[in-house]
Image (cartoon, rainbow, N blue to C red):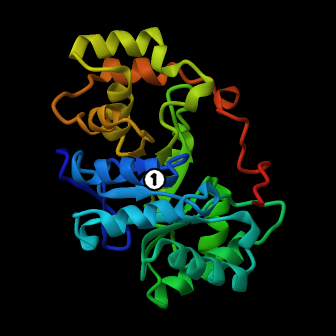
């Protein structure tokens, strides 16, 4: 796979192998970082969320950039407060107004919130919003296998992607396999484990990075790419943005991949104990 190659989706479309996470990219600095990412570093998939409170900055960057709109993949997410069908439709429209866009290239349900029991209703809203022309590709985020089974059974429509927590300390391999079984592309959020663990300083990863003349972040991105997982690192730094895309000139060995997989800590490895069956997200 080269930087220009894409992952095919079950709806007939495709996505770049690497996208840009945008959490905390806000205001004028955020707009400038996003424009740099698109114009100078070549990012085309931009991942935001209503809960990031930066859809305005993302929309402004899309308006200002010289990159044509049709080359960009703009993705956002439905917040937990809008799982009711009518609220979900309104929220999708409102997010488009905030961004100043006519459509989303990709849109996800941010969390399933199974205790509330409305995620199938929210999924039906995304299915219908796609029919209305508001969204091109629909997917979910943080859905477990049983959640996927439920929405597919209820609507007959399979998500194209499932964005899940995945980093070396929590590789989530069983859910990646479940996504593959359903024909769903896995996306990795917080691939570096955020700032609350030391994954980028991990000795195993640093040794692998030194072997290839790369930095640890590049090894982690490459680990995802070789596992056919779309990876969405977040960075405001132009240098780091460029590094995170520069992973197509080397290949990890099976030994390297296995060594990284062995760093998994299981459930204790989750960055903020956000288990999809327990986490309640209502903002």
- The answer to whether residue 126 shows anywhere in this view is yes
The residue sitting at 38% across, 27% down in the picture is 217
* Left or right of 283 on screen, residue 94: left
Give above or below for 75 relative to 82: above
Asked if residue 140 is positioned above or below residue 278 in the image, the reply reads below
In the displayed orientation, state which residue is furthest to the right. 115
Quarter-of-image position of residue 7: bottom left
Residue at point 51%, 77% (across, down): 96
Q: Is residue 20 left or right of residue 278?
A: left
Residue 182 in view of the camera? no
Which quarter of the image is occupied by the C terminus? bottom right
Residue in front for this viewpoint, 44 or 250: 44
Q: Residue at x 45, y 41 (%)?
A: 234
**Residue 185 at x, y percent in the picture:** 42, 56
Residue ID for mark 1 = 28
How many labels sit on residues?
Answer: 1
Describe residue 144's horizontal placement relative to residue 116 as left or right.
Answer: left
Please provide percent x and percent y for residue 167: 51, 32
Q: Quadrant of residue 219?
A: top left
Compared to 74, does 273 lie above or below?
Answer: above
Residue at 22% across, 17% down:
212
- Residue closer to the observer: 118 or 45: 45
């Amino acid at each position: 796979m080269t930087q220009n190659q894409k992952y095919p989706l079950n709806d007939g479309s495709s996505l770049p192998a690497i996208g840009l996470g945008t959490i905390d990219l806000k205001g004028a600095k955020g707009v400038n970082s996003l424009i740099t990412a698109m114009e100078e570093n070549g990012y085309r998939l931009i991942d935001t969320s209503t809960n990031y409170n930066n859809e305005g900055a993302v929309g402004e960057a899309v308006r200002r950039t010289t990159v044509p709109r049709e080359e960009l993949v703009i993705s956002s997410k439905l917040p937990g407060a809008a799982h009711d069908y009518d609220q979900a439709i309104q929220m999708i429209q409102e997010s488009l107004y905030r961004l100043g866009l006519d459509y989303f290239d990709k849109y996800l349900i941010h969390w399933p919130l199974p205790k509330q029991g409305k995620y199938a209703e929210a999924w039906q809203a995304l299915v219908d919003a796609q029919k209305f022309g508001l969204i091109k590709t629909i997917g979910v985020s943080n859905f477990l296998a049983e959640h996927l089974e439920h929405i597919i059974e209820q609507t007959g429509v399979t998500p194209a992607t499932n964005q899940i927590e995945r980093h070396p300390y929590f590789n989530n391999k069983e859910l990646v396999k479940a996504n593959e079984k359903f024909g769903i592309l896995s996306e990795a959020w917080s691939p570096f484990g955020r700032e609350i663990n030391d994954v980028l300083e991990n000795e195993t990863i640093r040794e692998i990075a030194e072997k290839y003349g790369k930095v640890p972040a590049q090894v982690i991105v490459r680990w995802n790419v070789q596992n056919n997982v779309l990876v969405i690192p977040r960075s405001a730094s132009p240098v780091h943005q460029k590094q995170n895309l520069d992973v197509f000139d080397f290949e990890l060995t099976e030994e390297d991949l296995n060594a990284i997989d062995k760093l998994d800590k299981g459930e204790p490895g989750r960055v903020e104990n956000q288990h999809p069956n327990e986490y309640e997200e209502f903002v």
